[in-house]
Image (spheres, grey):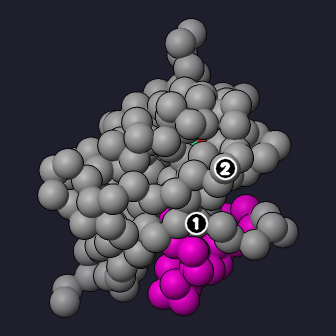
Amino acid sequence: MSTVRLFYALWPSPQLAASLAQWAQAARPACGGRVMRTETLHLTLAFLGPVEAQLADTLAAATPGYGIAPGEVPLDHLGVFQRPRILWSGPRDTPPSLQAVHDDLWQRLAGYGLAKPPQPFRPHVTLLRNIEHAEPPPRLPADAADGARTPLIWRYDRLVLVASESLSGGSRYRIVAQSRPLDA
Ligand code: 2AM
């Protein structure tokens, strides 16, 4: 049985991704670890893991119809996940509008027999993996060199379905479908 590793995410604009990449570079001297490639930065809404190819096709076909209310996420916090040794950025407090996007998505996915994980939703963008130091706690850098203001504000209007493909050098992400933005 062939499977595809899938997740739903918000995908940043190239400008936002570039600003986040600068935060990752700025944190690396203190934290160590590996900087995520700019083009892979994202905020996961629902991690599905390996899904049968037929279901993957069904989800890809349904995703354009998963329109979400446009919203904003303030990226006003840097945090550390100790066990996977990740430095991440995200909102200090999960915006209710983003929580609703997450919850509505999982409600749709439940219709395909996919179960929401029991852990609370902790929206984040992984910036560094395999960090070596988490003390002192990393702080948000000042305004980015490209003029982007801190905190960064992520304005979203769609979600994307992403396939994660294993390659010898790591994973490659491929956007297989995205939702159509709702009319304003
Ligand atoms: P991470 O960046 O915190 O590791 C692709 O792997 C995306 O799915 C990443 O955003 C990753 O989060 C997330 N992910 C991987 N495994 C997961 C799991 N078991 N539960 C939730 N999210 C997961």
Magenta stretch encompasses residue 56: no
Residue type at numbered disc 1: Pro
The circle on residue 102 is none
Magenta stretch encompasses residue 105: yes
Considering only vertical position in the picture, is 55 above or below 69? above
Q: Mark 2 or 1 closer to N-term?
A: 1
Residue 83: x percent and y percent? 82, 43
Please tell me whether mark 2 or mark 1 is closer to you in this view. 2
Residue 90 visible in the shown view:
yes
Rendered residue at 41%/75% (across/down): 73
Considering only vertical position in the picture, is 85 above or below 10? above
Q: Write down the residue under mark 2.
A: 136
Residue type at numbered disc 2: Pro
Q: Write down the residue under mark 1.
A: 123
Q: Is residue 128 left or right of residue 17?
A: right
- Quarter of image, res 114: bottom right
Q: Is residue 36 left or right of residue 114?
A: left
- Quarter of image, res 49: top right
Callout 1: SS:
loop
Q: Residues within 10 Å of mark 2 (few under 14, many from 20)?
A: few
Q: Is residue 140 left or right of residue 81?
A: left
Callout 2: SS:
loop
Q: Is mark 1 within 8 Å of ligand 1?
A: no
Image quadrant where one finds the N terminus:
top right
Residue 4 visible in the shown view:
no
Q: Which residues are magenta?
A: 90-116
